[in-house]
Image (spheres, rainbow, N blue to C red):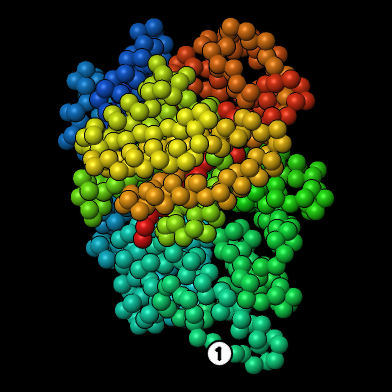
Amino acid sequence: MTPGAGDPNDGWRGPILRHFTFEIAAVARLTIVADPDELLTEQGILEAIRDRGFDLIPFDDHVAFRFAYESRYRQLWDQGEEANLVVVLRAHQSDVNALPYDLLEKARRDDRLLSFSVGQLFTNLAPNIVSALDRADFNRLFDAEQTNQPGQLGENATKDFVLRHVFEVTPEILKTDADLLRHLLARHYRGRVVPEKLDSRLVEQLCGGGAFNGWPLEEIVSNRTSFFEFIEERWPIFVAKYVSKRSDGVAEEREPYGLHYPGPGLLPFDDPTIRAYMDTLFVEGLLAPTDVAAKSDASEAWVRFGIADDAETDAVERFQKLTDVIRQEIPGKDADFRDWLEFASRWAQWNALGWSIQQSQLTPGEEAIDSIRRVVDSSFTEWMLQHFAALHSRSYLPKPAMLHHVAPYIAHGRDGATKSASDKKVALVVVDGLALSQWIPLRHSLRADGVGPSITEGAAFAWVPTLTSVSRQSIFAAEPPQYFAQSISTTQKEPKHWNRFWEEKGVPAAGVQYVCQKKQETEVDLLSRVAEAADHPACRVLGAVIGTVDQMMHGSPTGSAGLHAQVQHWAEEGYFARLVSSLIERGFTVFVTADHGSIEGTGCGKPNAGATAEERGERVHVFGEAMLRAQVTANFSDAIVWPSVGLPMKYLPLLAPARSAFVAEGRRTICHGGISLEEVIVPFVEIRAS
């Protein structure tokens, strides 16, 4: 459980959690909560409420909610079983009349109609500013308010208070280029999400001081990609001066050249508090090294990592350094889900590098690498078993946590755009089976072809079991799998799901397109069909599925390294870049994600499930009855009995443990369906023209 979430009197959660005690759970079947500020989506709140015996279900759609309520909770109550349901209405209490009358009357009768808001919890601060924060920042804000007792603050004063105490930035003390660069490095390296209102306030104050005239503050303060591009194009200028000073003691003055972003050409990368970041940024692939000098010209390691040399030598050195980073930063069992998303990016880089290096050159050796994988697998499995259940009830803002959040997130951005909703065009490209490590060569191909230019990278959790019919279908349905129980074993309903979601968002049926790559269909033919759909005069929303990587995976005889090489080759052929480019040229904002990744598994034996299993995969068997699953589990004691989190009640997965597969003992196979980090955390990327 998230620290501090268990004590009803602790922090900002206390006023909420005291309404959800074990004693109340024993007598309260139904609770309705008006939660306009989505406080009940925070990980600590969700887990504490669940730990005390309550199930949460959001009321976002009347039909979907009624289905879940009748098929799960009403059925249990009618059978005399206990189930404590919390219905969360993400609106003000005045809007609760949208709920079914029978539930509303029961909650009122039992005095279980509750309401929580930011204004009730942070009484001294402007609620519209506080509500824009990520809920993970509330602990720090609450402590700061209690400690400092600021009195009643207006909007600007609240912004300044939050910037200082939550994001640790006081604009008036940022006086030099090194001060600003240090702050932005610390922020963007960790990928911290800062609300737009706070960024605007920070930029306003930085501009007012005059010290940073000419800096592209509006771009690099808020946009992580822009910031890294800004410093990457200035790194060669610094290296050239660094090498020149070493060779003759005189720094050669050079005019900045080829800079896309305005601002100073020479940045103080050698400041002690800044250079500590630089080698890590190159090691983790956040910056690309320069070739303006030879690596031998640099005596200091932090500079050497930013100079390109022989590709294999560079990869070996990066892998060694990244191995040390990985060992130190494996999240623990009580980590926030964002910690795992952040770690997954480093893990993807580490795996991609390892597969690109000849085995004889690997340092550490294969045994040490396997040991690291075992530690990561164990830690992530423990985290998933404790915390995954809370993820699907989170909000899709500020970023999707899970794949069924993707479409609502896209719809929210579309509605909030400067263009009218009828003009804004969006495309969702789902690359079936694309692991986060395999996104890396695709990103390189996009950059090499000049596609974008704005690429914002992130990641999200797939649904478990990580099967296409479960996880990919949740993307297009924009709902947890329990809502499409009738089609959970097939993907044929995806076009209908996609159309229904967008029609409910006000997009007419003629404006919604869906294209799925057929088996054995060439990329050329797929590109043609996608272009035809995008060119439809009414098209405003396009969903496209690329099956190439999944087909490679299921036909790969050479393990993860071989699959990575195949994806690398496919990326270099440029089909993916051309598809994205064609959509950008047609005015679409493009979002890229995947339904699952994959691992190389080793056979632990094939269960003798026969007709008792509804589905039999290499990483998961699914049963319709708990007793049947238990019979198979008896022969596979290490297998994971996965709870039906967000799944239909009669959909009961049994997962192969660690890096095992339900195939003949010792046989190696590329597979998916389980809960390894590589299977579960997948790319979520936004690509814009500007």
* Residue 600 visible, this orientation: yes
Quadrant, the C terminus = bottom left
Q: Which one is in front, 561 or 583? A: 583
Q: Which one is in front, 332 or 656? A: 656
In the image, taking residue 119 as reference, residue 621 lies left or right, namely right
Q: Which one is in front, 72 or 672? A: 672
Which residue sits at x=74%, y=75%? 296
Q: Position of residue 452 (x, y in %)?
A: 42, 57
Q: Residue furthest right?
A: 360
Which residue sits at x=64%, y=66%? 279
Which residue sits at x=29%, y=30%? 499
- Dot 1 amino acid type: Glu
Q: What secondary structure is marked by label 1?
A: loop
In the image, taking residue 153 as reference, residue 437 lies left or right, namely right
Residue 377: quarter of image: top right
* Residue 389 visible, this orientation: no
Which residue sits at x=37%, y=48%? 583
10 Å crowding of disc 1: few (<14), some (14-19), many (20+): few
Q: Position of residue 446 (x, y in %)?
A: 49, 54
Residue at label 1?
Answer: 253
